[in-house]
């Protein structure tokens, strides 16, 4: 009997201890399940800014195959930095821009800006290829809403592979990550006052005319600084012939503004010249070149003057239209007129009738270009401008637009 009771007590003790252990294990498991499980953090990739790629501009002997290869190289490299807008969306926006812009506003730059606005895209890139005698100049333009940047490479005898590498290098220069250079703090430099007498650039004149000469010098120097780039190089794809060299100031010189402009026959109206005129300003133009405007006409190739008396170039200044009548002068052409109103001088190769407005679509089959040197001066200071232009002809005797004039 005693043995039987002892067995029952041992059995109950073992059962009690077993239940306690199981309860503690369940409590531990329950506790661990109630704690939050840390999930691995996912890296969020930054969204790329969008860009459009403007059709490639080309000049010279470049095959369509090579152009396509280089375009794809540009697209592939830009894809590292930007989300590229599909070509179909770009073309639709381009058509809408043509419809919405008035013909006076439809310059190439304005059209591209309108396309950017329609697509809500801040960035635009364009590749320009210029080939001559086996050598290739590549320039890449990056335009956003605030500024335009250009990088270029000149490659002698380069094959397609080398040109592809050059394009990748240009993209890196424009948008690639650059090393941060730590600048040393500027050293303290004591100011030194240097007195520069007016006579350093004004010849001996009566004292009453000295301030007038200083003003003329400053205006002339401003005109020189403002004319160091040829208008029409970046987005048009044309070869950039440098502007004429403007001579050092001499007493009596007069010039208000000067620009060298490349006007392409297929350029969508209107071309901005960056020349801002006041009513009555005199505009003097020297030009050369030729263009194919009407493929079905008897006179396919047109120069700045022709036997039919057609006006080849037309302008708009403010709200006034002005036709150009050129005369030949030793193989080049010249014209002069007074500005009928205030505003920027906008020009276009004329491919429309007197009763018509320029139609952007009619320019797609045109070819060729004109090189124009445009000067403006005050009508009351013609003597000073004549003195200036004679000096320009002397220092630019080998320029394509000056060679013929220098013989006369």
Image (spheres, rainbow, N blue to C red):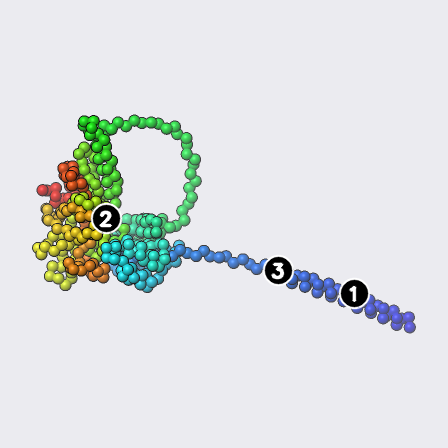
The residue carrying mark 2 is 344
Q: Nearer the viewer, residue 302 or 5?
A: 302
Q: Describe residue 179's horizontal placement relative to residue 221 as left or right.
A: right
Between the residue at mark 1 and the residue at mark 2, the CA separation in whole angstroms equals 101 Å
Q: Residues within 10 Å of mark 2 (few under 14, many from 20)?
A: some
Position of residue 344 relative to residue 40, above or below, is above
What numbered label is drawn on residue 17? Answer: 1
Residue 67 visible here: no
What numbered label is drawn on residue 271? Answer: none
Residue 56 placement: quadrant: bottom left
Residue 351 rendering spot, x and y as whole percentages:
17, 58
Q: Nearer the viewer, mark 3 or mark 2?
A: 2
Q: Describe residue 386's horizontal placement relative to residue 51 as left or right.
A: left
The residue carrying mark 3 is 36
Disc 3, disc 1: CB below 8 Å?
A: no
Which secondary structure, mark 2? strand
Q: Nearer the viewer, residue 309 or 23?
A: 309
Q: Say which residue appears at 23% left-offset and 55% top-offset.
A: 104
Residue 398 rendering spot, x and y as whole percentages:
16, 43
Q: Residues within 10 Å of mark 3 (few under 14, many from 20)?
A: few
Position of residue 254 relative to residue 88, above or below, is above
């Amino acid at each position: 009997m005693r043995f039987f009771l002892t067995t029952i007590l041992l059995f109950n003790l073992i059962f009690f201890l077993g239940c306690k252990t199981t309860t503690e294990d369940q409590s531990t498991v329950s506790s661990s399940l109630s704690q939050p499980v840390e999930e691995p953090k996912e890296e969020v990739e930054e969204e790329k800014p969008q860009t459009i790629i403007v059709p490639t501009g080309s000049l010279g002997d470049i095959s369509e195959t090579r152009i396509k290869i280089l375009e794809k190289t540009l697209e592939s490299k830009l894809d590292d930095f930007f989300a590229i807008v599909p070509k179909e969306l770009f073309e639709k926006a381009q058509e809408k821009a043509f419809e919405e812009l008035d013909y006076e506003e439809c310059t190439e730059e304005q059209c591209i800006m309108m396309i950017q606005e329609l697509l809500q895209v801040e960035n635009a890139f364009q590749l320009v290829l210029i080939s001559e005698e086996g050598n290739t100049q590549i320039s890449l333009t990056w335009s956003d809403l605030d500024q335009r940047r250009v990088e270029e490479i000149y490659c002698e005898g380069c094959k397609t592979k080398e040109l592809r590498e050059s394009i990748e290098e240009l993209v890196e220069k424009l948008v690639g990550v650059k090393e941060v250079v730590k600048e040393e703090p500027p050293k303290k430099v004591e100011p030194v006052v240097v007195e520069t007498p007016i006579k350093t650039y004004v010849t001996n004149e009566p004292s009453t005319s000295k301030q007038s000469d200083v003003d003329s010098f400053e205006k002339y120097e401003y005109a020189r600084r403002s004319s160091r780039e040829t208008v029409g190089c970046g987005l048009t794809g044309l070869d950039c012939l440098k502007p004429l060299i403007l001579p050092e100031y001499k007493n009596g010189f007069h010039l208000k503004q000067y620009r060298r402009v490349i006007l392409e026959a297929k350029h969508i109206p209107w071309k901005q010249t960056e020349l801002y005129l006041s009513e009555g300003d005199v505009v003097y133009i020297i030009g050369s070149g030729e263009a194919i405007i009407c493929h079905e006409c008897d006179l396919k190739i047109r120069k700045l003057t022709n036997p039919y008396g057609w006006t080849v170039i037309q302008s708009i200044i403010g709200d006034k239209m002005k036709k150009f009548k050129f005369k030949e002068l030793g193989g080049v052409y010249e014209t002069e007129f007074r500005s009928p109103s205030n505003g920027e001088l906008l020009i276009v190769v004329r491919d429309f009738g007197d009763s018509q407005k320029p139609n952007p679509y009619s320019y797609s089959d045109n070819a060729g270009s004109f090189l124009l040197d445009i000067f403006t001066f005050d009508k009351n200071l013609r003597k000073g401008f004549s003195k200036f232009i004679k000096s320009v002809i002397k220092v630019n005797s080998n320029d394509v637009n000056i060679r013929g004039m220098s013989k006369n």
